[in-house]
Amino acid sequence: MKKLSLRSLIPNLFTFISLTFGLTAIKFAIEEKWQISVSLIVFASFLDNIDGKLARLLKTNSDFGVELDSLSDFISFGIAPAVVVYLWSKSLFFESSWAFVIFYAICSSSRLAKFNLSNFEKGDDLKKIKFFSGISTPAAAGITLLPMMFYFRFSPSLNINELLIKFYIFIPAILMISNIPTYSLKGIKFEKKLLPFLIILLASFLSLLLTDFWLAMIILIVVYFLSIPFAINEFRKI
């Protein structure tokens, strides 16, 4: 019997922690501890970006890890954000529609299934490396939770529209199952002359993240959302 090394378990450990954060976010949402709930989903998204990179770095890629990551993503980013927003909107307006949660879950599961199938396709063409088809589930989770982040940062001056909150969830859900090209982190490359600027930019963002967490997250998600038209334009030129 082939023995597993501790090194091969490290990426999966990060995936399990990400899954734990996603489930626990629902628990805190039930208790109406909204900021903790949203923070856990944000931390889960950071871990989701780490586990795949660790697997490639440690050369421990496996089919089991890929499937585990997909199932974890479905819980943490395909269900948890929609449930959290549903419970939050109920606390504000006393009513909400569970149908929005179901629609979001259906779109996220379809997006993950499509992504898994694309991994079996042969070829490493530039478009496949540099772009996703539709937005990823972690990105969709960030966009879904954006109204809550605005509320945390600018409340009580922020005027919340009931219809906007209820129907807003359709935007990330539809973007997940769309064929709109969006940037993939592993395909983004920079020229060496831009390195000092990028270091300053990253240091500034980390500083803002430590001093004004919700503002930093709002800026990050808005920048990602605004990058979509640039991705579409670049995709067409390749």
Image (cartoon, rainbow, N blue to C red):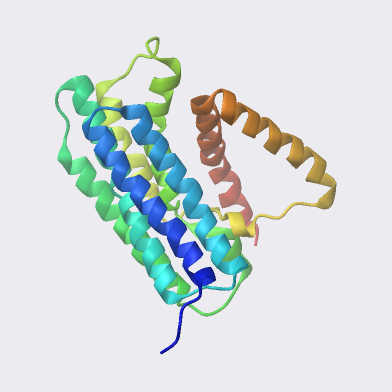
Nearer to the camera, 148 or 165? 148
Nearer to the camera, 69 or 162? 69
Image quadrant containing the N terminus: bottom left
Image spot of residue 194 (x, y percent): 80, 45
Residue at figure coordinates x 23%, y 48% from the top left:
103
Q: Residue furthest bottom?
A: 1
In the depicted structure, whether residue 89 falls above or below residue 193? above
Residue at figure coordinates x 21%, y 34% from the top left:
30
* Left or right of residue 165, residue 214 in this image: right
Image spot of residue 77 (x, y percent): 36, 48
Image spot of residue 50 (x, y percent): 54, 55
* Left or right of residue 1, residue 107 in this image: left
Quarter of the image where one finds residue 109: bottom left
Quarter of the image where one finds residue 169: top left
Q: Is residue 29 visible?
A: yes
Q: Residue furthest right?
A: 193
